[in-house]
Image (cartoon, rainbow, N blue to C red):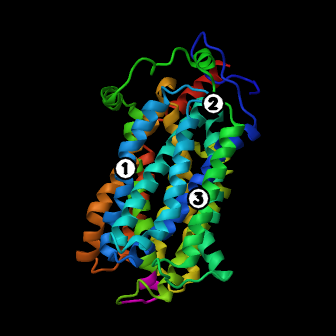
């Protein structure tokens, strides 16, 4: 790894080397595959489960499995990845294993109907969603820690921005793929499995991309050895400490910055969960005017394709916007940049209520894309500056609590609210999501950014 000027380091330790743009790119490339899979999951899981017989108000309860699994898996993976040192590396064994299981789940989910003579397809599908999300979490969590492991403080905004760019590229293609296959002759009619061919083959392609992208990072990225790690950070604080009790102690000792970011994450991810779960049915009913038992109709698939493509738009915007986040952070600060982006997302979600032409959904997703890029980068940039180096894995995993908890709460109450308060109209869940994004924007302004303080002190000392 190329060396250059040091970032702020503890006295007596060797400066951590700066990395080239190519090194940062290959280090983060696996996220392209992870988000390719997430895009397929986010854009199509609701309609797959609906085709298996789920009612719209039941969808949050099926989606709740994902954050529940993440709440358990991510801290454990973070805890043990802090302690893993083998021939493959420190973080690599985890995201490679996660990739293999994720690919298997991507292949099996749209084929759950094939075993419906033994077990209801809906329950098999829900089980596959759980396995898929657990595997995604195993693959994803170590990537956050890998970026913080390898980059000095002064490069972390750029590192997470490159990561967000690759996330956006993967998500754009993954979101657009079902529509692309439909335009090229793949059937949109539910076949023997209950899922249209364009969806099934998109998931097969997603499985291959997922594994391929992870392998790029595995083969082209170096992780620091234990000796190098100690040279840059001092003795690993995680060494010799193990078990659930240690995780509980780390949770109790979480930094002040993490606690403050927790409120920001709560509002942000409550909104995102509503968007992923309800947008397809909100557009189908509020924009397309569908009613009754429409879940297996071609018109519903058309609405689903439009939403999936619109999700591709917000991911494309996020990929481009991510490249400008480091520059914006220089002028607006990290918190100001995140607040601006979240406001854009809130306005975008609320605007969906006023749409009459499905094509206008594209413009709403521009604001969502700005928010999504920032959500994937800025909280981690702000957080990483407040975490002890030897605890990066576990605290990145614990930070996931503030992502999964709002989704679990939404999953428990969101469907009931849509049915009994919103009169079965999911569009109002999208409007509430927009207001929650605005609340997140206000909340981030009150967060203490310890990393930014360190960088300012470093500049003063120079």
The residue beneath circle 1 is 69
> Which label sits in the foreground, 1 or 2?
1
Give the x, y percent position of residue 228. Answer: 63, 18
Looking at the rendering, the stretch of residues picked out in magenta corresponds to 284-291
How crowded is the residue under tag 2: few (<14 C-alpha within 10 Å), some, or many (20+)?
many
In this rendered view, identify the residue nearer to me: 303 or 382. 303
**Mark 3 vs mark 2, CA separation in Å:** 28 Å
In this rendered view, identify the residue nearer to me: 367 or 14. 14
State the quadrant of the N terminus: top right
Tell me which residue sits at (57%, 52%) in the image. Answer: 34
Q: Earlier in the sequence, mark 3 or mark 1?
A: 1
How crowded is the residue under tag 3: few (<14 C-alpha within 10 Å), some, or many (20+)?
many
Q: Earlier in the sequence, mark 1 or mark 2?
A: 1
The residue beneath circle 2 is 150
The residue beneath circle 3 is 207
How crowded is the residue under tag 1: few (<14 C-alpha within 10 Å), some, or many (20+)?
some
Label 3: which secondary element: helix
Asked if disc 3 and disc 1 are in contact, CB closer than 8 Å, the reply is no
Residue 82 visible at all? yes
Residue 314 visible at all? no
State whether residue 216 is above or below residue 255. Answer: below
Asked if disc 3 and disc 2 are in contact, CB closer than 8 Å, the reply is no
């Amino acid at each position: 790894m190329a060396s250059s000027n040091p970032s702020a380091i503890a006295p007596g330790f060797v400066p951590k080397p700066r990395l080239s743009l190519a090194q940062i790119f290959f280090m983060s490339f696996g996220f392209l595959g992870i988000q390719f899979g997430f895009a397929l999951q986010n854009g199509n899981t609701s309609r797959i489960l609906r085709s298996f017989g789920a009612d719209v108000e039941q969808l949050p309860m099926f989606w709740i499995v994902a954050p529940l699994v993440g709440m358990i898996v991510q801290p454990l993976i973070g805890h043990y990845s802090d302690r893993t040192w083998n021939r493959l590396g420190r973080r690599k064994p985890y995201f490679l294993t996660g990739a293999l299981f994720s690919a298997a789940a991507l292949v099996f989910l749209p084929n759950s109907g094939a075993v419906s003579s033994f077990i209801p397809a809906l329950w098999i599908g829900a089980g596959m969603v759980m396995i898929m999300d657990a595997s995604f979490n195993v693959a994803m969590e170590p990537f956050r820690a890998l970026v913080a492991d390898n980059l000095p403080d002064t490069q972390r905004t750029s590192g997470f921005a490159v990561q967000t760019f690759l996330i956006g590229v993967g998500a754009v293609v993954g979101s657009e793929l079902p529509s692309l296959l439909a335009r090229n002759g793949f059937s949109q009619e539910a076949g023997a499995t209950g899922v249209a061919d364009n969806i099934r083959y998109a998931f097969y392609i997603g499985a291959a991309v997922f594994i391929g992208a992870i392998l790029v990072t595995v083969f082209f990225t170096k992780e620091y050895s234990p000796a190098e790690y100690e040279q840059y950070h001092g003795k690993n604080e995680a060494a010799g400490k193990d078990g659930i009790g240690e995780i509980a102690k780390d949770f109790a000792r979480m930094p002040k910055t993490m606690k403050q970011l927790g409120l920001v994450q709560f509002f942000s991810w409550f909104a995102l969960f509503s968007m992923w779960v309800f947008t397809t049915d909100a557009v189908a009913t509020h924009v397309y005017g569908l009613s009754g038992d429409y879940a297996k109709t071609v018109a519903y698939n058309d609405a689903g394709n439009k939403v999936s493509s619109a999700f591709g738009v917000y991911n494309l915007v996020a990929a481009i916007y991510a490249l400008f986040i480091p520059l914006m952070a220089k002028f607006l600060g990290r918190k100001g940049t995140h607040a601006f982006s979240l406001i854009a997302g809130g306005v975008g979600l609320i605007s969906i209520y006023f749409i009459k032409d499905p094509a206008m959904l594209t413009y709403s997703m521009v604001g969502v894309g700005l928010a999504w890029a920032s959500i994937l980068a800025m909280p981690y940039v702000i957080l990483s500056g407040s975490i002890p180096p030897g605890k990066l894995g576990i605290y990145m995993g614990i930070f996931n609590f503030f992502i999964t908890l709002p989704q679990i709460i939404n999953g428990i109450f969101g469907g009931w609210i849509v049915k009994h308060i919103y009169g079965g109209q999911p569009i109002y869940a999208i409007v509430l999501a927009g207001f929650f994004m605005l609340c997140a924007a206000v909340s981030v302004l009150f967060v203490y950014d310890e990393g930014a303080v360190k960088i300012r002190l470093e500049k003063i000392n120079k």
